[in-house]
């Protein structure tokens, strides 16, 4: 019998009154991988994740985490799942180290608390009440609370929001270590470079549905309209060149002697370009390939307008 995926969402529907927040969404978050769930504000990603965490009951559809229903089987899942909240969940007057030790005590085999505190740079904040911690310290404490119990699945909501570069990289390293230890990580983030760096899989959600799934590399390459630029003698026949490049959308001489090819940039297009140039005794110089970023893909899929 095959092992179930860590998280499975099938035809999930969630409504708020007459508003459909999640509209038949289906996704699989693979065991032992990092999945980044991306989407503009109001896309339905937070509602989906909260349903996976057991905080919301599906209006229809099916959600399973480690083979269990997070709404009905919350007690059984709680020791096996870590949840990082953006805000709240901590008594304002409790000291950071006390809170973390308390959470660790709820688990049979927690991580070493002093080592985790040191790794996340919380040593100096251990005796500080939660309400007096900086936003970044609160964020790191929330992360520590989510992972201290050695969860099998961990949900991270904007894990590096408000962090300085050093803390951000320390968080990335911790997340990568979780994957190395076989933990399934599901994270939401607005930082495309973070998703590109960490994620094995990216799930893009918009208007309550999944609009794209794949690794960052696959999403950036699929249908990819990248660019290939080069220098050569001014006045080349760009119309003839474009006709010789089946993968090219267009070819422009953007300034005298500088050319940009837009389209499906791959080895075939490069070979066709150099063959066309060789046949005309043209030497292309400074060949440079540029691919669209994950942010480019995200904007293509979801639009660039601001949303409330």
Image (cartoon, rainbow, N blue to C red):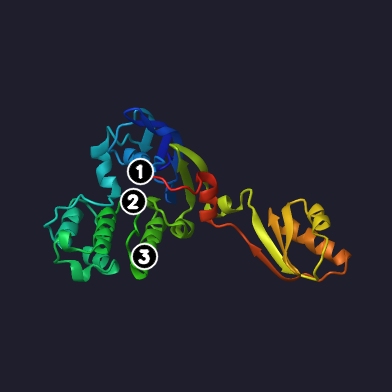
| Mark 1 burial class by Cα count in 10 Å: few <14, some 14-19, many 20+ | some
Residue at disc 2, secondary structure: strand
Q: Nearer the viewer, residue 84 or 44?
A: 44
Which label sits on residue 157? 2
Q: Residue furthest front?
A: 255
Residue that appears at 35% across and 63% down: 171
Q: Which residue is mark 1?
A: 46
Relative image position of residue 68 (x, y in whole percent): 33, 36
Relative image position of residue 268 (x, y in whole percent): 75, 56
Q: CA distance from mark 2 to mark 3?
A: 14 Å
Q: Is residue 175 above or below residue 35?
A: below
For the N terminus, give its image quadrant: top left
Q: Determine the image quadrant of residue 168.
A: bottom left
Any part of residue 1 in sight: no
Q: Nearer the viewer, residue 187 or 303?
A: 303
Residue that appears at 45% across and 35% down: 26
**Is the C-beta separation of discs 1 and 3 under 8 Å?**
no
Q: Earlier in the sequence, mark 1 or mark 3?
A: 1
């Amino acid at each position: 019998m095959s092992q179930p995926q860590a998280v499975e969402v099938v035809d999930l529907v969630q409504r708020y009154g007459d508003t459909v927040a999640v509209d038949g969404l289906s996704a699989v978050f693979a065991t032992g991988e990092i999945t980044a769930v991306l989407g503009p504000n109001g896309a339905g990603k937070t509602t989906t994740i909260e349903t996976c965490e057991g905080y919301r009951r599906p209006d229809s559809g099916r959600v399973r985490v480690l083979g269990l229903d997070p709404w009905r089987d919350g007690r059984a899942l709680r020791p096996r799942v870590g949840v990082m909240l953006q805000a709240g969940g901590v008594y304002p007057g409790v000291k950071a180290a006390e809170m973390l030790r308390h959470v660790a005590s709820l688990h049979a085999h927690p991580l070493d608390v002093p080592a985790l505190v040191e790794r996340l740079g919380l040593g100096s904040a251990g005796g500080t009440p939660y309400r007096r911690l900086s936003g970044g310290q609160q964020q790191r404490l929330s992360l520590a609370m989510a992972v201290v119990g050695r969860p099998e699945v961990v949900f991270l909501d904007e894990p590096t929001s408000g962090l300085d570069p050093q803390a951000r990289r320390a968080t990335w390293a911790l997340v990568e270590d979780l994957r190395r230890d076989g933990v399934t990580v599901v994270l939401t983030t607005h930082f495309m470079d973070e998703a590109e760096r960490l994620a094995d899989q990216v799930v893009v959600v918009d208007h309550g549905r999944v609009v794209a799934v794949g690794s960052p590399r696959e999403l950036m390459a699929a249908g990819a309209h990248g660019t290939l630029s080069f220098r050569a003698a001014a006045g080349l026949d760009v119309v003839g060149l474009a006709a010789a490049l089946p993968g090219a959308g267009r070819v422009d001489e953007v300034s005298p002697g500088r050319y940009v090819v837009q389209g499906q940039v791959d080895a075939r297009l490069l070979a066709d370009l150099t063959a066309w140039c060789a046949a005309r005794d043209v030497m292309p110089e400074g060949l440079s390939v540029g691919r669209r970023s994950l942010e480019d893909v995200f904007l293509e899929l979801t639009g660039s307008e601001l949303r409330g």
